[in-house]
Image: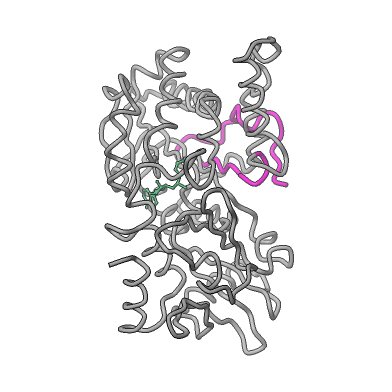
Amino acid sequence: MSLRALIVERIRDRGPLTTAEFMDLALYHPTLGYYTRAPQRTGRAGDFYTSVDVGPQFGALLAIQIDEMHRLLASAGSLVFDLVEVGAGNGQLARDLLDTAEATYPELYAVTRLTLVETSAAARAVQPNTLGRHWARLASSATTMPDRVSGAILANELLDALPTHAVSMTSDGLREIYIDLAGDRLVERTGPPSSPALADYLARLDVDLAAGWRGEINLAAVEWVRTAARRLERGFIILIDYGHTAEELYSQGHGTGTLTSFHRHLIGTVGDDPHQPDGPAWLSHPGERDITAHVDLTSVRAAAEAEGLEVLGLLDQSYFLLGLGALDDPGIGAANADALKQRLALKTLLVPGGLGSTHKVLLLGKQVGVPPLRGCSFRTRVT
Ligand SMILES: C[S@@+](CC[C@H](N)C(=O)[O-])C[C@H]1O[C@@H](n2cnc3c(N)ncnc32)[C@H](O)[C@@H]1O
């Protein structure tokens, strides 16, 4: 049975799905989900690019930040360094990080205990191949985070891939957007909120959605941060995601919401023609395309602070990478093919309007005080 047929049957049996339930099936159904079925979904042959696909530069720059974090913990007596990457995919970012650590930060490399957390079994299966000789540094590859972490938890483009609720404001108050059937077509339909948690979430933020606006409420992202914060005994969390402050996210500028789908590098949004034969683009071909929504960094940050974590930085990816010395490499000026490739990769990571400003970095610390971090040394600004 196709995933679409399964979703149609589920709606016929049990009624409309919340967008979170739809996304959970479309992306993570145990056998038919988009991420479940393939070891890699990103890059040129996939549907969209992450910073990791641009080249090894992203991991190499992150290694500088991780090394600083390791030194801060080591100077306070830590002998091992847990590096826990969540949503690790095929292990490429860990590989890039460890390549740099091995070559440049041998003390970090020697004490690193790597854990790759990834729900997709297909992605986990190719991690040994990606990690190569670094496999020896791997403590585990699992579907859930370890119970106790002393070191750093890292997640690149995880929270924006978690199933999210979608809501709209009407003159009758807050409504939730459900996925229902019109004949055989998957369509959006509004109904009463599936949980009081949705209205509570907006009330906590003190944001007012105007009538006619829609938005996403990612309860799973907030829950994930709570869990990560609790499991971190001591150290840091680095979160990198498509995101905005709540003030920006729940504003007229994003009044049509941010649910977006990617298929072969073509973008579909909720603004697409909802009357096309297969319904709105993000609903069409479930299991064949990525679905994502921008992250509410204000709520993620508040959840971490409520668990006793300190916010050490919240900034655009460009500023973070510039703080880490993205433009300091002496090779960058050299006139050879490698240097040109490197320059182009850095441009892609840094350029405003691209990954550099759509992606934000949230740096959190627990039991480490409030050290100034190198990634925040250029400028700490969210645009
Ligand atoms: C957008 S991809 C990003 C992959 C990689 N981090 C990168 O930047 O290229 C999101 C990944 O997170 C994984 N994922 C989703 N929910 C997860 C969870 N709760 N725990 C661990 N991995 C998860 C997905 O299977 C997918 O591989």
Q: Nearer the viewer, residue 238 or 341?
A: 341
Q: Is residue 164 left or right of residue 122?
A: right
> Number of marks in the image?
0
Q: Which residue does the image show at 41% across and 22% down from the upper left?
A: 98
- State the scheme by which the image is colored: one colour
Percent position of residue 240, x then y: 54, 43
Q: Is residue 130 above or below residue 33?
A: above
Residue 380 lies in the magenta-colored region: yes
Q: Is residue 334 left or right of residue 107?
A: right
Residue 359 lies in the magenta-colored region: yes
Quadrant in which the N terminus is drawn:
bottom left
Q: Is residue 316 above or below residue 204?
A: above
Residue 16, located in which quarter of the rendered image?
bottom left
Q: Nearer the viewer, residue 353 or 8?
A: 8
Q: Which residue does the image show at 68% across and 30% down from the upper left?
A: 347
Percent position of residue 85, x then y: 39, 38
Q: Is residue 42 above or below residue 260?
A: above
Percent position of residue 224, x then y: 41, 54
Q: Which residue does the image show at 38% across and 18% down from the upper left?
A: 109
Percent position of residue 209, x then y: 67, 74
Residue at far front of view: 277
Q: Give the magenta range.
A: 356-383
Q: Which residue does the image show at 64% across and 32% down from the upper left?
A: 376
Q: Is residue 162 left or right of residue 174?
A: left
Q: Is residue 242 above or below residue 202?
A: above
Q: Is residue 153 left or right of residue 146?
A: right
